Image: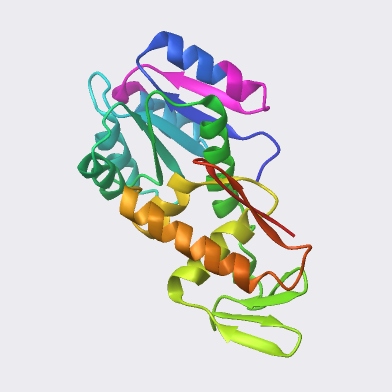
Amino acid sequence: MPDTIKILLAEDEPSLALIVKESLETRDFEVIVCTDGEEALQRYAEEIPQLLVLDVMMPKIDGFAVAEHIRKTDKKTPIIFLTAKSQTKDVVEGFQHGGNDYLKKPFSIEELIVRIYALLNRVGGTDTQNQEDEINIGSYIFNPTKQTLTYKEDSEILTHRETEVLKHLYKNKNEMVTRSFILNDIWGNDDFFSGRSLDVFISKLRKKLSADPAVQIINSRGFGYKLVC
């Protein structure tokens, strides 16, 4: 990733836009603020940002339409939607229009920043699986392709979901990954039942990684998980 990350923020509520802009700038992001969807498309073409944060309900062109237009030529740049809509169908619609994450208003700035870092890491060349099949996690060897976790001479097969969850945690090792991000990326939603399912897989992974005390999955209750190794 480049030293200075350029983020396009499209938000028609001036006070919220200012808070988000100033908070991101304290993390050394460069922030381009737009107040409607038409301006967002114009500035996107001019500035080529590394990530977009789009309010869904905007004048002229809404956030979903902006994302859909961008996805015709750009499949890679991460997009986070901001919206007061909270129903599952609204979240699903956001992903169908090309969004990578979905943050419901009101939200904490810290949560937004965590999600931004997580998405940038995914597209910034930190996916070790693309470089090698075997990943060292403490004393364990994790092979995402074969879906195996090996400790010394003992190897066990992981389920597809266990593999996907561990991949997400490893990509962002030593950093907090939000529950919502994992759920939406793997399950396609972050409803109650998917959340309970995620909790089960986290418990299983903790047990399978318990032989090495230097490896831990830390839980921030109600927020997310961090793989420490």
Q: Nearer the viewer, residue 225 or 203?
A: 203
Task: Residue 53 in the image: state x and y as whole percent.
Answer: 43, 32
Can residue 187 be seen at all in this image of the molecule? yes
Q: Is residue 29 magenta?
A: yes
Can residue 75 be seen at all in this image of the molecule? no
Q: Nearer the viewer, residue 229 or 54?
A: 229
Region rendered in magenta: 22-39
Displayed quadrant of residue 81: top left
Residue lying furthest top: 15
Q: How many marks?
A: 0
Relative side of 110 to 104, left or right = right
Q: Residue at x 43, y 45 (%)?
A: 180
Relative side of 123 to 62, left or right = right
Task: Residue 193 in the image: state x and y as whole percent.
Answer: 32, 54
Displayed quadrant of residue 2: top right
Residue lying furthest bottom: 153
Query: Is 213 rendered above or below residue 176?
Result: below
Q: Is residue 227 magenta?
A: no
Query: Is 188 rendered above or below residue 60?
Result: below
Task: Residue 202 in the image: state x and y as whole percent.
Answer: 53, 61
Q: Residue at x 53, y 33 (%)?
A: 111
Query: Is 180 rendered above or below residue 86?
Result: below
Query: Is 62 rendered above or below residue 223?
Result: above
Displayed quadrant of residue 69: top left
Q: Residue at x 61, y 35 (%)?
A: 5
Tell me the quarter of the image containing the C terminus: bottom right
What color scheme is it? Answer: rainbow
Q: Residue at x 20, y 44 (%)?
A: 89
